[in-house]
């Protein structure tokens, strides 16, 4: 008499499918960068400027020659004026090895620090920005090394 296998044909096929799907489910570079952007947006909403700045490489600069430290300080000052809400639109990323470029539209709204009337709920301080981000892969993480399209506010 033949020993019966604990694996039925449907169970074996399902097992092989799960293994193949898990191998295919690795996160793409574009998905990793999108997750990093979403994490930075969530950090801004939580008034966590350090968390929002974590996406920036230490050697970051922007079109106005501001550094990571400068941008973090500007973000801190902006959050003192009230909450900042950001929505990302039209995110398009091109990856070339360990470098990438993302073009996106950002809707940024500065909220009132305190809601005293219904007028404080209106988007009176909204801006739409067309940004180009340059990324570099550092280890397993993608970090922004340069941004074009930010307003040219400064401390000077």
Image (tube, rainbow, N blue to C red):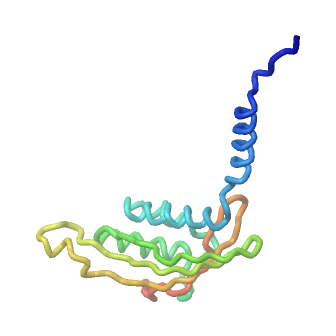
The residue most toward the left is 117
Q: Nearer the viewer, residue 73 or 56?
A: 56
Left or right position of 142 against 36: right
Q: On screen, 49 above or below 151? A: above
Q: Nearer the viewer, residue 3 or 49?
A: 3
Q: On screen, 40 above or below 104? A: above
Residue 66: % across, % down: 54, 82
Q: Which residue corresponds to the image point at 36% horizontal and 74% vertical from the top-left? A: 78
Looking at the rendered structure, the number of numbered marks drawn on it comes to: 0
Left or right position of 96 against 117: right
Residue 91: % across, % down: 54, 75
Residue 82: % across, % down: 28, 69
Residue 51: % across, % down: 49, 60
Name the quadrant of the N terminus. top right
Q: Which residue corresponds to the image point at 41% horizontal and 72% vertical from the top-left? A: 87
Q: Which residue corresponds to the image point at 15% horizontal and 75% vertical from the top-left? A: 119
Left or right position of 111 against 66: left
The residue most toward the front is 1
Q: Nearer the viewer, residue 98 or 154?
A: 98
Q: Which residue corresponds to the image point at 57% horizontal and 83% vertical from the top-left? A: 132
Name the quadrant of the C terminus. bottom left
Q: On screen, 152 above or below 74? A: below
The residue most toward the right is 1
The residue most toward the top is 1
């Amino acid at each position: 008499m033949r020993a019966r296998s604990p694996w039925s044909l449907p169970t074996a096929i399902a097992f092989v499918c799960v293994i193949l799907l898990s191998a295919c489910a690795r996160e793409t570079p574009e998905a990793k960068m999108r997750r990093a952007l979403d994490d930075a947006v969530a950090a801004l909403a939580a008034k966590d400027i350090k968390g929002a700045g974590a996406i920036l490489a230490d050697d970051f600069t922007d079109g106005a020659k501001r550094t990571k430290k400068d941008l973090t300080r500007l973000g801190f000052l902006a959050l003192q004026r009230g909450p900042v809400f950001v929505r990302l639109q039209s995110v398009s990323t091109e990856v070339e090895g360990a470098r990438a470029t993302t073009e996106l539209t950002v809707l940024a709204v500065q909220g009132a620090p305190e809601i005293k009337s219904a007028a404080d709920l209106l988007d009176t301080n909204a801006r739409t920005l067309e940004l180009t981000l340059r990324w570099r892969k550092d280890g397993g993480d993608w970090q922004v090394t340069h941004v074009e399209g930010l307003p040219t506010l400064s401390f000077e």
